[in-house]
Amino acid sequence: MSVELTLEQRVERLEAVHEIQNMMSKMPRRTPPGVASIHRRGHPLDRICRDTQVMRNHPAVDATKDPLKEERKAA
Amino acid sequence: MTDIADLELRIARLEAAREIENLMGRFESYHAAYRNELIPAMFADRDDLIIEMPFGTYLGRDAARRVWRGALTEDIPPTDLSGEYVEHLLTTPVIEVAKDGMTAKAAWISPGAEAHHFGWEEGNPLKAFWYWGRYNVDFIKEDGAWKIWHLTHSATFITDYHHSYAEPEHALSTPPAPSGRHAPDAPPRGQVPYSPTFNPGDLPVAPEPYDTYEGV
């Protein structure tokens, strides 16, 4: 079923695409000092998961802006 | 209900980001095709242009002309372009258009490859090398079109095809510095080159969202 979007919704979707692109480009550069590559051992995927967890808990990261956490809270 | 003026501004900011992406893509395609003479017109017609290149800093209205028509064209042989190659990619883009829609700040990481005749070396050898860098650029809207206002091109590493960037003993020779009327106004600025003592914390971070431009 197709949904008719309002003009504002269409603009919002384009803004979202742009914002997501910016967010992903910033990710590797916004790592708080001392956090990047803490976990140097093990499988690369494990390292990414552990680094991500450290990032989420780091005081320099604004956890209130983590959409996944917000989603989990809502659930 | 959304104010139509607000919606128009939001659409204009989205269009701006797209136009800036095309502007920079075109900039690189001109450079790759050795059409450097087309590049100065992509800059704003203003007295406060700033261009920071690995070989020096250029200031003022004619800065782009002195870099792309002068230092990178007239000063550097050869006139025979056989085998010459320059390709700089634009990746990891962050484009932040000001809330007022009048300016924008952007950053790209730029892997690249080049091949040149090293005319300043005995025998004019043709050498291929990797050229990785970063672009940090401010844009301004001028007569309805987006133009480059301040541009920093930082060379992270320039390394021979056969040696890694962690082997400074194999560093390539550098061309003579631009001189005469194409000489830079100041030494290079904003450069964060890779070295065995490189600190990644020195790299510039991507621009954040902002309301209005408040100076360099």
Image (cartoon, coloured by chain):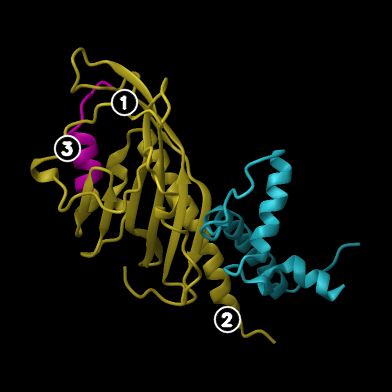
| Amino acid type for the residue under numbered disc 3 | Ala
Kindly report the distance in space between the C-alpha atoms of the residues bearing marks 1 and 3.
21 Å
Rendered cyan, the chain in question is A
Magenta-colored segment: predominant secondary structure: helix
In terms of sequence position, does the residue under pointer 3 or pointer 2 come before the other? 2
| Residue B1 spot, x, y in % from top left | 70, 87
- Residue drawn at x 31%, y 53% is B190
Q: Report helix, strand or loop for mark 2.
A: helix
Q: Residue at x 30, y 60 (%)?
A: B44
Q: Name the residue under label 1.
A: B169
The crowd level at tag 3 (other Cα within 10 Å; few <14, some 14-19, many 20+) is few
* Vertical side of B122 occupied by B189: above or below: below
Q: In this view, does B28 lie above or below A55?
A: above
Q: Which chain is yellow?
A: B
Q: What is the C-alpha distance between the residues marked 3 and 2?
A: 49 Å
Up-down relation of residue B3 to residue B56 (above or below): below
Amino acid type, label 1: Glu
Quadrant in the picture for residue B27:
top left
Q: Where is residue B82 in the image (x, y as percent from the top left)?
A: 32, 18
Label 2: which residue? B6
